[in-house]
């Protein structure tokens, strides 16, 4: 009997919901930041317009501001008007008298009395004649033509953005147009990261013959930073449960919003995270490969998300569970784009588990890179997508559509697959 059959197995969607629920009470305080620091942040409260947009009636294009009534009914004739003083953008004009046309630039205020703008290319002669001369324009101009009315976009006092919305470039531009140079946003959540194992050493240090360098701390720190989470400490802990318990108690003094670990969650003899936290949470198998062993707990009232320890398992688990949970709870990071694309080659899925394969998407088809093994990090580095292969007993032929999680902003071909290496069947997940 496989170890996956020894315990109840949780579905992928069910575990994503469980992680979301575990994080639901994370509510970072508000802080005020300048607009240049606001991209991707989340509004702490609703944004109410302090002024109307546009703030005044203005011209939608270069042309002549006129009184529509002066142009008479529509007819196959032109009307002749006297050219008034020009109105550049940024200048407050005087009122427009009857029978006159004021040259007006795009965005310039409309003179009082004017209610229409005639594009300069429709006038005769072409261009802007000097003040005091005459200009002929088509008769029958409708009131409101090419006029941007004050408050047409938003009225002062209206709520334009809701609390919890992520600040995109357009939303930041709206705040700037309203004259705001600072915004109240949610502070970045704070996380402590743990990686485990006597066999793991930090990059840049001496490595023993039976040791490997710690890739997981770097993966988690990068994923959390991209997700808008501040890593306040990253610890490499040995296979010593009492030592880990002491370390965890000390790190609670940092007052993090979240603990995240990789490794130590399965069923071996040195699963220190599980040994310390199992009384305070749950450790399950998820019907997914890689990333089957998962845990959720609380340490000192703080949510603790426990991920498996192989590097690709850590990466895939973050993308499948923790990142979407952060998005739902905090509004940040932006959701990964998803797509459906046909397989470039046949592949056999797992009978009872969703298989998450590293892949390259060219905008048309998806090609798997590397094998399914959770240690094949080079293949993960080449990938720009995760291909979700549903459980099944039959081979999926080339051309079968599969769901993709797009990792590089949804840009096809953002990563190169490189030479086809590392196609082993993989090990523990």
Image (cartoon, helix red, strand yellow):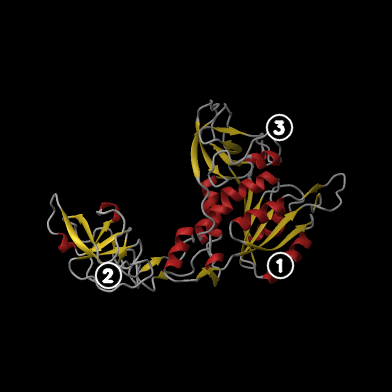
Residue 251 lies, in percent from the top left, at 71, 67
Residue 34 in sight in this render: yes
Residue at the spot 46% in from the left edge and 71% down from the top edge:
180
Q: Earlier in the sequence, mark 3 or mark 2?
A: 2
In what element is the residue under mark 3?
A: loop
- Residue 314 against residue 5 in the figure, above or below: below
226 vs 51, nearest the viewer: 51
Mark 1, other Cα within 10 Å: few <14 / some 14–19 / many ≥20: some
Residue at the spot 74% in from the left edge and 63% down from the top edge:
245
Residue 214 lies, in percent from the top left, at 76, 51
> Which quadrant of the view contains residue 249?
bottom right
Mark 2, other Cα within 10 Å: few <14 / some 14–19 / many ≥20: many
- Which residue is denoted by mark 2 in the rendering? 111
Residue 417 lies, in percent from the top left, at 64, 35
- Residue 421 against residue 114 in the figure, above or below: above
- Which residue is denoted by mark 3 in the rendering? 421
Side (left or right) of 340 relative to 286:
left
């Amino acid at each position: 009997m496989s170890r996956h059959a020894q315990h109840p197995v949780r579905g992928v969607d069910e575990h994503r919901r469980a992680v979301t629920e575990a994080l639901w009470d994370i509510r970072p305080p508000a802080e005020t930041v300048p607009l240049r620091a606001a991209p991707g942040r989340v509004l702490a409260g609703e944004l109410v317009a302090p002024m109307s947009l546009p703030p005044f009636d203005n011209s939608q294009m270069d042309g002549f501001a006129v009184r529509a009534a002066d142009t008479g009914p529509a007819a196959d004739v032109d009307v002749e008007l006297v050219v008034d003083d020009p109105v550049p953008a940024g200048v407050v004009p005087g009122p427009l008298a009857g029978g006159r046309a004021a040259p007006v630039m795009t965005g310039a205020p409309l003179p009082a009395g004017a209610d229409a703008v005639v594009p300069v290319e429709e006038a005769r002669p072409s261009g802007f004649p000097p003040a005091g001369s005459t200009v002929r324009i088509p008769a029958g101009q409708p009131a409101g033509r090419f006029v941007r009315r004050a408050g047409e976009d938003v009225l002062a006092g209206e709520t334009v953005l809701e609390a919890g919305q992520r600040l995109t470039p357009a939303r930041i531009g709206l705040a700037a147009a309203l004259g705001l140079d600072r915004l109240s946003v949610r502070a970045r959540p704070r996380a402590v990261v743990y990686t485990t194992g006597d066999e793991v050493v930090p990059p840049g240090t001496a490595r023993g013959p039976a040791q490997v360098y710690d890739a997981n701390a770097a993966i988690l720190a990068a994923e959390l930073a991209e997700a808008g989470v501040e890593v306040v400490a990253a610890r490499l802990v040995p296979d010593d449960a009492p030592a880990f318990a002491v370390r965890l108690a000390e790190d609670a003094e940092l007052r993090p919003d979240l603990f995240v670990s990789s490794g130590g969650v399965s069923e071996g003899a040195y699963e220190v995270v599980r040994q310390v936290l199992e009384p305070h949470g749950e450790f399950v198998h998820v019907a997914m490969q890689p990333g089957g062993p998962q845990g959720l707990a609380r340490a000192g009232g703080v949510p603790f998300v426990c991920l498996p320890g192989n590097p690709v398992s850590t990466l895939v688990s973050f993308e499948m569970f923790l990142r979407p949970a952060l998005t739902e709870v905090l509004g940040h990071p932006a959701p990964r784009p998803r797509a459906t694309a046909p397989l470039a080659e046949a592949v056999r899925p797992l009978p009872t588990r969703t298989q998450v394969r590293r892949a390259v998407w060219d905008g048309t088809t998806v090609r798997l890179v590397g094998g399914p093994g959770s240690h094949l990090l080079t293949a993960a580095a080449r990938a720009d997508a995760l291909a979700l292969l549903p459980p099944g007993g039959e081979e999926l032929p080339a051309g079968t559509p599969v769901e993709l999680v797009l990792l590089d902003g949804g840009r096809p071909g953002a990563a190169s697959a490189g030479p086809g290496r590392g196609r082993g069947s993989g090990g523990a997940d």
